[in-house]
């Protein structure tokens, strides 16, 4: 099975990109994602209590989701807040944002739970650190399930 | 040839002032051939965002831990790492990092297992250097490989195994985790991952001495007199008696190890790196809960 199998197009392309390069370049790609993570919109920046913490991550990160519409076809948007001093965590958030934002609830809920292990990062940053990304994905899915009632 | 020690008067009162350098000392000595600066962070990418010019990265997961066994690298592994980072046995190594130097102290402690002669911490770490607006770069140096001898790791002096802890019950044992971790309300740091300890609490007889008591707001170490007031007067620890420190995985207790051994001059300080992730999972070891050290079981 290919690492990109069963993934929506945007996420599949991220997985393919990571697996096409060396371990050293994967670090650089993760860093690029950490730097392009969109800023939190003001309506959340002023209300941090609306965001959910992710204790599986070593560094503090908060996230929330918005769902347009209802049911399986509702469109999902993701928002993250993490300090610049936590680039690994920001990088995970950046990948999830690029890979998932704008998908339908059905597509988000169908993302395999092991997706963080398909990026070839275990060797580059250690498997333990990847748990943070799985923690974020788990929370995103739970929020999407609740908010879309899908 | 080692570099001169930092004669900053704020360090003079420490037991081993030669183990600490100020940001100014480092700025003055950057680029000298006998010096290698090492960044060691919790976040593995932080170095790549920007670091002190000329600094090399040493990561605790990827470089210091053995890839298979839950242990540190061996003498060959350490020599290979040192060689790749341009460090020889005579190099003055200055380590700094994020999070109040937790991982920097941890790296220094691992260097100590191999008896590297001259290893020092940057007081205040990465945050202080940055807050002073000092130079940072994303250029990664490519040191020419150097000869580092294969030195067998000597654990006995500064590292405690669980058997040592069991044998030391009733002696000076300090738990440097947060209070809720000590009492057993939680098994991990606030905002940190559940590291998978099955039980909450502390090792019976261990005093709660959170690591942060030793640090100022800016991440520098408190002065000798303040540290003595905390560790010796308030907590009643005796410098001539052995002491073992532990936390969750041994990083915060490395910070306390540094304070006790190098700043206060305690004679026999060991870090129990198995810490709570080991003890809290062991079958049939005693555990105490609540805010008191608790009864030490008779053996």
Image: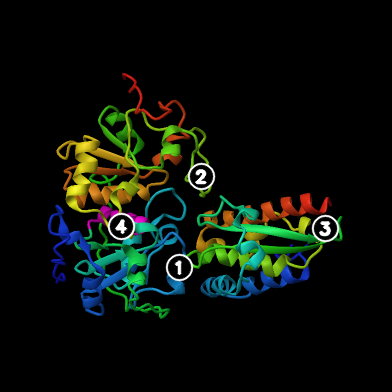
Helix or strand or loop: what does disc 4 sit on? helix
Helix or strand or loop: what does disc 2 sit on? loop
Name the disc covering residue B46, or none.
Answer: 1
Name the disc covering residue A106, or none.
Answer: 3
Mark 4 Cα-neighbour bin, 10 Å: few <14, some 14–19, many ≥20: some
Name the disc covering residue B176, or none.
Answer: none
Q: Label 2 near label 1: C-beta < 8 Å?
A: no
Q: Is residue A143 visible?
A: yes
The span from disc 3 to disc 1 (Cα, nearest Å) is: 35 Å
**Labels 4 and 3 within one chain:** no
Q: Is the residue B298 above or below the residue A118 in the image?
A: above
Residue with the mark numbered 2: B195
Q: Label 2 near label 4: C-beta < 8 Å?
A: no
Q: Quadrant of the N terminus of chain B?
A: bottom left
Helix or strand or loop: what does disc 1 sit on? helix
Chain hosting mark 3: A
Helix or strand or loop: what does disc 3 sit on? helix
Residue plotted at (37% across, 31% down): B203
Q: Is residue B242 visible?
A: no
Q: Main secondary structure of the magenta part?
A: helix
Q: Residue furthest top?
A: B298
Residue B112 is covered by the magenta coloring:
yes
The span from disc 4 to disc 1 (Cα, nearest Å) is: 27 Å
Q: Label 2 near label 3: C-beta < 8 Å?
A: no
Badge nearest the viewer, 1 or 2: 1
Q: Which residues are magenta?
A: B102-115
Q: Is the residue A89 above or below the residue B207 in the image?
A: below
Q: Earlier in the sequence, mark 1 or mark 2?
A: 1
Q: Is residue A9 left or right of residue B165?
A: right
**Labels 3 and 2 within one chain:** no
The span from disc 4 to disc 3 (Cα, nearest Å) is: 52 Å
Residue with the mark numbered 4: B75
């Amino acid at each position: 099975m290919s690492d990109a199998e069963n993934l929506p197009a945007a996420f599949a392309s991220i997985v393919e990109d990571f697996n096409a390069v060396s371990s050293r370049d994967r670090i650089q790609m993760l860093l690029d994602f950490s730097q392009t993570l969109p800023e939190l919109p003001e309506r959340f920046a002023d209300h941090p209590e609306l965001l959910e913490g992710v204790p599986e991550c070593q560094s503090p990160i908060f996230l929330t989701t918005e769902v347009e519409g209802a049911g399986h076809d509702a469109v999902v948007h993701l928002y993250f807040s993490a300090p610049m001093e936590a680039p690994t965590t920001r990088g995970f958030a950046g990948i999830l944002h690029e890979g998932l934002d704008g998908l339908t609830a059905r597509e988000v809920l169908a993302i395999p739970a092991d997706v963080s292990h398909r990026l070839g990062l275990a060797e580059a940053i250690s498997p333990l650190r990847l748990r943070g990304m799985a923690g974020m994905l788990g929370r995103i899915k739970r929020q999407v399930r609740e908010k879309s009632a899908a | 040839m080692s570099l001169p020690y930092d004669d900053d008067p704020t360090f003079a009162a420490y037991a081993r002032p030669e183990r600490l350098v100020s940001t100014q000392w480092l700025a003055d000595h950057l680029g000298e051939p006998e010096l290698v600066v090492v960044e060691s962070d919790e976040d593995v990418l932080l170095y790549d965002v920007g670091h002190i010019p000329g600094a090399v990265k040493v990561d605790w997961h990827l470089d210091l831990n053995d890839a298979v066994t839950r242990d540190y690298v061996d003498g060959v592994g350490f020599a290979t790492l040192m060689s790749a980072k341009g460090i020889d046995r005579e190099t003055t190594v200055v380590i700094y990092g994020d999070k109040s130097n937790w991982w920097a102290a941890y790296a220094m402690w691992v260097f100590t297992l191999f008896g590297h002669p001259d290893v020092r911490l940057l007081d205040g770490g990465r945050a202080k250097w940055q807050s002073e607006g000092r130079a940072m770069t994303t250029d990664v140096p490519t040191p020419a490989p150097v000869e580092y001898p294969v030195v067998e790791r000597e654990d006995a002096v500064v590292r405690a195994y669980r058997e040592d802890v069991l044998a030391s019950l009733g002696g000076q044992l300090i738990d440097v985790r947060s209070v809720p971790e000590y009492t057993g309300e939680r098994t991990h740091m606030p905002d940190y991952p559940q590291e998978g300890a099955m039980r909450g609490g502390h090792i019976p007889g261990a005093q709660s001495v959170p690591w942060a008591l030793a640090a100022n707001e800016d991440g520098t170490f408190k002065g000798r007199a303040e540290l003595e007031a905390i560790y010796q007067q308030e907590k009643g620890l005796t410098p001539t008696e052995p002491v073992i420190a532990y936390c969750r995985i041994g990083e915060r207790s490395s910070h306390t190890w540094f304070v006790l051994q190098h700043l206060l001059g305690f004679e026999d300080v060991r870090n129990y790196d198995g810490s709570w992730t080991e003890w809290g999972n062991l079958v049939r070891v005693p555990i105490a809960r609540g805010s008191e050290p608790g009864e030490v079981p008779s053996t």
